[in-house]
Image (cartoon, grey):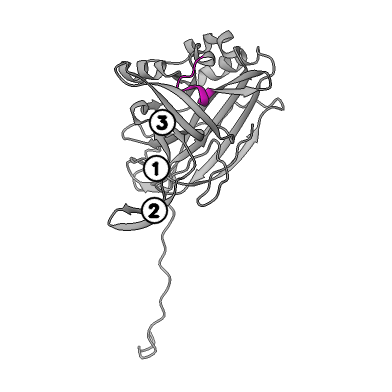
Amino acid sequence: MTFKPRRPQTDARCCIGLVACASVLIAGCNFFKDGAFNWKSRDNTAGENPFKVAESQPASDTPGIRTCTVRFSVLRVEVPGGGLQRIDKIWSMVDTNVIPRDVAATMRDNGFRIGVGHDSARAPIRAAIDTLPDVRSRDDQVLPGVNKTVEVFITDAQRDMELMWFSPGGGLSGLSFNAARPVLRFGWAIEPPRLSDVIVRVEPEIREPPGRVRYQRLDDMWQLRPEYQGRVFKELAFSVVIPEGGFLMLGPTDDLAGSPKLGRPFFVEPSGTGQRESLYVISPIVRWGPAPAISADSVAPPASAPAPD
């Protein structure tokens, strides 16, 4: 399984990581970002502790304009099929009541499990994972520009998918996708007065290759663009507040491995004659600093101007 970046106008693959905002604000970065990004990753299978991330820096009390930078370290932990059920206790180490009950119920129906943890939970979660055999992990980073979203492509493999989709309210329908890949879309915001907490918004998506090129209206202009193929499941979008030093944990429900639920391609991958399951630990890091000094270039006087005394 490989993790590669997604950049505009290429077929490169993205994986997980680092988000940065370079907005100069007094109150913080209070809007979501979307679009392309740069990428780099680190393989943590050699024994390094991937759960250690840089600590957040709270905003100082110094008045004036400051620069806010937010980045995400997103860790993917992959274990043999059934392994996550053996360490189910890790979900008691995080708060699983962080989204509205109806949204949480729909997410569970579709195979998604969600929790938010504090920094103190990292060590016991790591210890539980270390009891499993053949654990693989990868810590990937991406750097978007202004007004950009992080798109996490779960796998390089394009697969035909026949999935069950439980809509809010309990309705059940079947969905078919051709040569598709699962994607997790991340947006983020910071709202005063808690300038060290990060609001993270997540949307699952199943994306197929682009369709034919046709004219599409964008704002007040018509442009030739490839037709989007796939579906963004806005009904499953959720937002959580991650405290300073904390993290968002995403994983599969216990019944997902044997079910064609929507969440299956996000967390379960075929491997030889068996399966492997994935858990995601998403850690935002906030940095506040002084705004860069703005200096005006000196301007020479016009040739006709009198020389200064």
Which residue is the site of mark 2?
Answer: 214
Circle 3: element type: strand
Circle 2: element type: strand
What's the mark number on residue 202? 3
**76 drawn magenta:** no
Q: Which of 224 and 53 is in front in this view?
A: 224
User: In the figure, is residue 49 to the left or right of 102?
Assistant: right
Q: Which of marks 3 and 1 is nearer the N terminus?
A: 1
Q: Nearer the viewer, residue 102 or 42?
A: 102
Q: Quadrant of residue 269?
A: top right
The Cα atoms of the two marked residues, 2 and 1, are separated by 27 Å
Residue farthest to the left, as pictured = 220
Task: Give the amino acid at mark 3.
Answer: Val
Q: Quadrant of the N terminus?
A: top right
Mark 1 burial class by Cα count in 10 Å: few <14, some 14-19, many 20+: many
Q: Is residue 74 visible?
A: yes
Q: Quadrant of residue 188?
A: top left
Residue at left 54%, top 15%? 257
Task: Give the amino acid at mark 2.
Answer: Arg
Residue at left 56%, top 46%? 11
Q: Where's residue 182, x and y in %?
A: 49, 32
| Labels 2, 3: front one | 2
Mark 3 burial class by Cα count in 10 Å: few <14, some 14-19, many 20+: some
User: In the figure, is residue 84 to the left or right of 192?
Assistant: right
Q: Where's residue 259, x and y in %?
A: 50, 15
Q: Where's residue 6, x and y in %?
A: 53, 44
Vertical comparison of 16 with 107: above or below: below
Q: Quadrant of the C terminus?
A: bottom left
Which residue is the site of mark 1?
Answer: 33
Q: Which stretch did the figure color magenta?
A: 259-267
Q: Earlier in the sequence, mark 2 or mark 1?
A: 1
